Structure formats: structure tokens, C-alpha cells
Amino acid sequence: MLEFPEGFLWGTATAAHQIEGGNFNNDWWDWEHNPDSGCVEPSGDACDSFHRWREDVDLVADLGLGAYRFSLEWSRIEPAEGEWSIAALDHYRRICAACHGRGIQPVVTFHHFTTPRWLAARGGWEAPDAPERFARFVERATAHLGDLVGRACTINEPNVIGVMGYNLGAFPPGVKRDVSRQIAVNEAMVRSHRLAVDALRSGPGTFPIGMTLSMAELVAGEGGEEARDAAQEILEDSFLTATGGDDFIGVQCYTRMRFGPKGRLLPPEEGVAVTQMGYEFWPQVVEHTVRRAAQVTGLPVLVTENGIGTDDDTKRIEYVREGLKGVHRCIGDGVDVRGYFAWSLLDNFEWALGYGPTFGLVAVDRTTFERRPKPSAFWFGKVASTNTLESVTSDGS
Ligand code: NOJ
């Protein structure tokens, strides 16, 4: 039986575009409808969480979790440049208030992959004033709901925006293998993060602030050290070293990546199971990345996302359990880990892959939007409410 420290934060995470539905005013909506983008389907109504958010908050509370991480949709709050929607701000304020009402900490992400159309039309993160425009949005949103924010994540996976949008071409604007543009966007993201931290601190409320970074266990096979180190620098270290003065670092991790003399080694190693994402089933990634993030940044760590795309819910329990054992080992060694958030509360829109991969603790009927918690939801809820692992069996009894 593994006990976690008192006050350890147990939560689950979502993102606006993946669950709200009808986010037609951002760059992703455009991208999903572009026949050349490679997206398998549009987000459409998603989980209709724009209307059903109260059910979502209730689910989190009923499962016994202590925190709900969700994101603000910038394109709803600032639908045209410099034009603010009080109604949209009120909407997110109500979600924060409902979290408090149910004893849950609202963990608010200010940017989760989507950018308003008006900024995308001016070059998105390549527009020279993008960081200032983002900071102005953060400042405005914080002024409206900062007193209710429990914890703030500035930008979700700022490293993924560059790699997916300017190298792999799977996210807007769909540019392939342009490393200099990727690096320029990375720099814009870092600057945006820094300005956002200042904006968050200027408003009402005092809450911990951090960036959430996509991390992996980056492994060098024979002769792969150079490629691994280069990947580590562009994907992780250039961001981890820009967190000075922050209150925490959010680690988001799913798998490992292997490198050989010519770069990334694909496909996954023989004998290692593969998830719906094509990732290696690699729960060891949690311990590895938590240690690394703590070591490089010196900051307290929260695992702000970890989970698995699978249609076998017993695998989800196995994956999360193994990851949590790693977190527990880190804590035992004195690493300051403050919380763990399962990705995701709901089966939702997995970006270019549409609704195929299912990461949710809770299934969502694609026609009625009915939410049905899976056994893993009850299992995870019990881990959270007892603050211990292994004292519960896989079926939550
Ligand atoms: C990280 C992203 O933040 C989230 O949007 C995505 O759904 C998960 N990884 C799973 O791929």
C-alpha cells in the first residue's frame, strides 16, 4: 500500500476545443475542415461541454477527485481583435465557481492549442506581436476570473505547437520540416509564457502559475546520442530552462522515443505493446520525466497530463497504476511532486485523429452526449479519495 503525501492533488484534465463543441472561430476549426490537412474528421459538437460543463464538474467531484483542469477558449473570449465577450468570461467564471462549490480546485489553462482566427490570419504565433496579444488576453481573462483561479497553466505544451505545426505538419498551419520556423515559434512561445506569467500576477487572486510541457523518455540507441541530445534541446530543454521564477512545472507524458544515428527510430520496438496512438505502452515515462523536469527546473512538479488511448479499460488502470508507482518512488527520493492529473476526464476530440483514440475515464455517447464512467474512473477516484495506491483492486472495490 503506497501512501501519497497529505494534500497531494488528484485531478483530471480536458481542453476547450476537445470537449466544448462548436468552436468555429479558431484555427483548428478551419484546419479540421481543410481536406488537405489529414484530419480524419471535424470536432463538431465534441462532448457538448459548452452546455454540459456542470455535468463534467459533477463527475469530477462525484469520483472523489480534488481538481479539474480545463482550458479557456481564447476565440470565444476575444472573438475579434480587442473585442471582449463578457458572456464568455462569465461562462468560465461559472465553471470556476462551480468547482469551488463542489470542493474542487479549478486549474485553468489559458491556451490549449487553439488560436483565434483573427490572429491565425495575421500569421498566428509567427505574428511579431503574438506574445503581446496573448498576454493581453491573459490579463483581461485574469481580471475577470483571477479571484476564482486555483492554479494557472499558461500554455499547454508550447513545444508541441512548434513541432506539430512547423515540422510534422499535423497541426495548423501544417508546415513540414521547417526547423528555423519551428525554433522561431518556440521562442515566441517562451516569450508568450513569460509575459503571461506577469499578466497573471498583475490581476486579482494569488495562485501558483506554471507552463505544462510535453515530455517523453528520450532514449539513445547505438550511435543515437547526438540525435537524442538535439531532440532534447529543441523539444524540452529550451522550454524547461525558461521557467525561472515560476511556481511549478507541469509534466505531460505518454511514452518514450528512441533515437539512432539518423534520428528517430520507428516503428516501436518489437515486443513492446502499442496504444491507439501508435505509442509504445511505456508507463515508466512518468518517473523519468518527473525526475528530469525537477532536476532541470528546480521547481515543484505536477503531472498535469498522463494517460493512454485504449479501448481496453483494464490497460488504462494498469498504465496509470504503473505511472503512479513511479511518482511515488520520486516522492520517496525527495522529489517535490505535488499532484497527478489523468488525461482525460472524457473520451474527446483527439485533434487530427478525431474521435478514434479514447483517453477518457468516462465514455461519451457521440449522439446523446451521455457520460458513462468506465471502471478506471471509479478506480482512479478511489485512489484519489484514499490517497493511496494498491489498497484498491482493479474493479474499484
Ligand atoms: C496532450 C495534449 O495536451 C492533449 O490535448 C492531447 O489530447 C493528449 N496529449 C493526448 O494526445
Image (cartoon, rainbow, N blue to C red):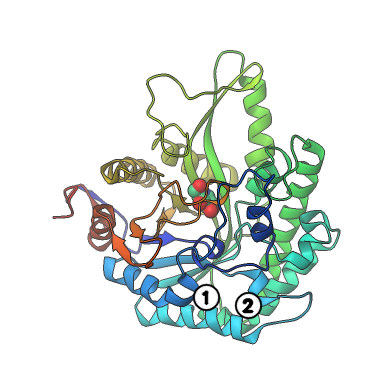
Whether residue 135 is visible to the viewer of this picture, yes or no, is yes
Residue 102's place in the image compared with 378, above or below, is: below
The x, y position of residue 374, in whole percent, is 27, 55
The x, y position of residue 89, in whole percent, is 60, 81
Who comes first in sequence, dot 2 or dot 1? 2
Nearer-the-camera pick, 201 or 257: 257
Residue 43's place in the image compared with 357, above or below, is: below
The amino acid marked with disc number 2 is Thr
Residue that protrudes farthest toward the top in the picture = 222
Residue 1's place in the image compared with 7, above or below, is: above
Q: Quadrant of residue 329?
A: top left
Q: Residue at label 1?
A: 149
Q: Is residue 46 left or right of residue 7?
A: right
Which disc number belongs to residue 320?
A: none
Mark 1 residue's CB less than 8 Å from ligand 1: no
The x, y position of residue 85, in whole percent, is 66, 83
Residue at image x 60%, y 47%? 39
Residue at image x 36%, y 74%? 55
> Tags 2 and 1 in contact by the CB under 8 Å rule?
yes
Q: Residue at label 2?
A: 142
The x, y position of residue 33, in whole percent, is 65, 55
Residue that protrudes farthest toward the right in the picture = 128
Circle 1 crowding by C-alpha within 10 Å: few under 14, some 14–19, many from 20: many
